[in-house]
Amino acid sequence: MVTIQVDMHDQLASALQDDLTTKIAKFNAKGVLIDISSLDIVDSFIGRMLANTSAMARVLDAQTVVVGMQPAVAITLVELGLNLSGVHTALDVERGMEMLRRQIGIIDQDEDTGA
Amino acid sequence: MLKAEIISVAASGDIVAVRHAVRRQAVKINLSLVDQTKIVTAASELARNMLIYGGGGEVTLELLQDGVRHGLRVHFVDTGPGIPDIELALRDGFTTGKGMGLGLGGAKRLVNQFNIESAPGKGTRVTIVRWR
């Protein structure tokens, strides 16, 4: 799980993308959750970084969910022309985790015994 | 017209400085959160274009007042190689670099007024305005 908490300059965004991809392979991660609730803009560069990370993760057999996009950011992103197709999104961390669990096919112990 | 701020853009960190300055001025004229986000995003795209294609340049922010209306105008001026075909450069998906080709056309959609002047060898000057 990655929480982006600063206004990233381009090189930092690229570094994060490389770092994440390396760590997915190193730890054999199956799910990646990127929390962007602190970001007050997503421009084409950051949008591309999110799309690339998601695509690279998929090639490495991991699922990515981007969570917490602010409504003003979503409106702007679409008008800018970015639709982030291929990037899974969820409203918040909780829902994002649920989505990942479903995609990876992990069933919660509690849910399992409760059913 | 009030000259508010001038920022020179020479490295990717300066794009962040432009975003912060535009946000600060947009808040000053009480733009809605969505409109703030739009002009900050447009400025981020244009500042990056200026850095990548124009070799850097200067961003000037101005506050405008037209009767009771307030606005924020931002100029992006570089002395780079210029754009040979502006119409083509504005088209979505067109890029000569490694970007997504959304910068110019996308930025235009996010503001109320958009003006671009450029010629080969003469640099590029883009002006955007967002009114409250």
Image (cartoon, rainbow, N blue to C red):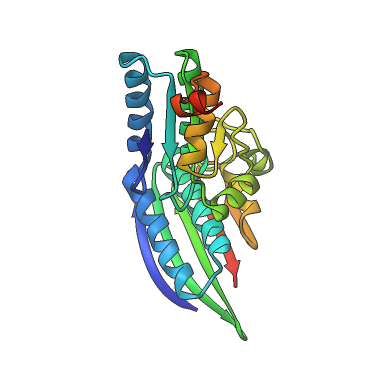
Answer above or below: position of A2 versus B48: above
Residue at position x 46%, y 32% in the image = A49
Residue B80 at least partly seen:
no
Q: Position of residue B64 (x, y in %)?
A: 53, 76
Answer above or below: position of A59 versus A49: above
Answer above or below: position of A26 versus A114: above
Residue lying farthest bottom? B67
Q: Is residue B68 left or right of residue A7?
A: right
Quadrant of the frame with the C terminus of chain A: top right
> Exactly how many numbered labels are in the figure?
0
Q: Which residue occupies the foreground of this view, A18 or A87?
A: A87
Q: Is residue A53 left or right of residue A99?
A: left
User: Quarter of the image holding residue B66?
Assistant: bottom right
Q: Position of residue A28 (x, y in %)?
A: 36, 14
User: Quarter of the image holding residue B21?
Assistant: bottom left
Residue at position x 52%, y 57% in the image = B37
Quadrant of the frame with the N terminus of chain A: top left
Residue A41 at least partly seen:
yes
Q: Position of residue A94 (x, y in %)?
A: 47, 40
Q: Which residue occupies the foreground of this view, B85 or B24?
A: B24
Residue at position x 54%, y 31% in the image = A99
Q: Which residue occupies the foreground of this view, A34 or B36?
A: A34
Answer above or below: position of A97 versus B24: above
